[in-house]
Image: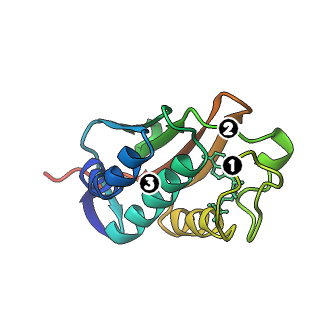
Amino acid sequence: PARIDVLDTVREAVDGLRPIAESNRLSLRLEGVSVDVFADRDRVQQVATNLVGNAMKFTEAGGEIHLSVASGPNGFALITVRDTGIGIMPNDLEKIFDLFFRVQGQVTQEPGSGLGLAISRRLVELMGGEITAQSEVGVGSTFTFTLPEAASKA
Ligand code: ADP
């Protein structure tokens, strides 16, 4: 881990996914403020790529994926990935971070391993943060992860 600007780091990952978003006719937006966190740049990008990748898989053409980076309470940066996709039922929502878990019978049967979110949770926790999900079927899903802010320079 090192001092990194999390907005910058997430932007790089998001820019790499723009071509896929465009070819799927998905709007992909990122907004927020620069926040210095103490984290591993490659791993933060891996988590962001997983979350945005999922959002793109489970959102129909014409939908929106919106990321935001903010400085949250208690010295943690807050990174949110919100989609207007198919959503996740409450029963499934409890299990999506489990190894190999995939929601059955989804309208969009997308390829996948069920590993992405389990790995993302592990990585975020190793960096001292947390990852959570909220969702409403037919409305969309929001994934949020936190990372410890780096102590101010000075
Ligand atoms: P994978 O996407 O490879 O199957 P993940 O661990 O990343 O594995 O995700 C687990 C499951 O959670 C997915 O198969 C899907 O059913 C559900 N899921 C994850 N992200 C979303 C999302 N943004 N919208 C709807 N369902 C999702």
15 sits left or right of 144 in the view: left
> In the image, is residue 95 above or below residue 100?
above
Q: Which residue is mark 1?
A: 108
Helix, strand or loop for disc 2: loop
Q: Position of residue 109 (x, y in %)?
A: 71, 55
Q: Position of residue 138 (x, y in %)?
A: 70, 29
Q: Looking at the picture, which amino acid does disc 1 mark?
A: Thr
What is the CA distance from the residue labelled 2 to the residue labelled 1?
Answer: 8 Å
Neighbour tally class for label 3: few under 14, some 14-19, many 20 plus, Cα within 10 Å = many
Which residue is at the far left?
Answer: 154
* Foreground pick, 43 / 125: 43
Residue at figure coordinates x 43%, y 66% from the top left: 46
Q: Within 8 Å of ligand 1, the CB of disc 1?
A: no
Q: Which mark is residue 86?
A: 2
- The type of colouring in the image is rainbow
Neighbour tally class for label 2: few under 14, some 14-19, many 20 plus, Cα within 10 Å = many
Numbered disc in front, either 3 or 2? 2
Helix, strand or loop for disc 3: strand
What is the CA distance from the residue labelled 3 to the residue labelled 2?
Answer: 27 Å
Residue at figure coordinates x 51%, y 48% from the top left: 56
Q: Are marks 2 and 1 in contact (CB under 8 Å)?
A: yes
What is the CA distance from the residue labelled 1 to the residue labelled 3?
Answer: 31 Å
Q: Quadrant of residue 135?
A: top right
Q: Position of residue 130 (x, y in %)?
A: 57, 54
Q: Quadrant of residue 139?
A: top right
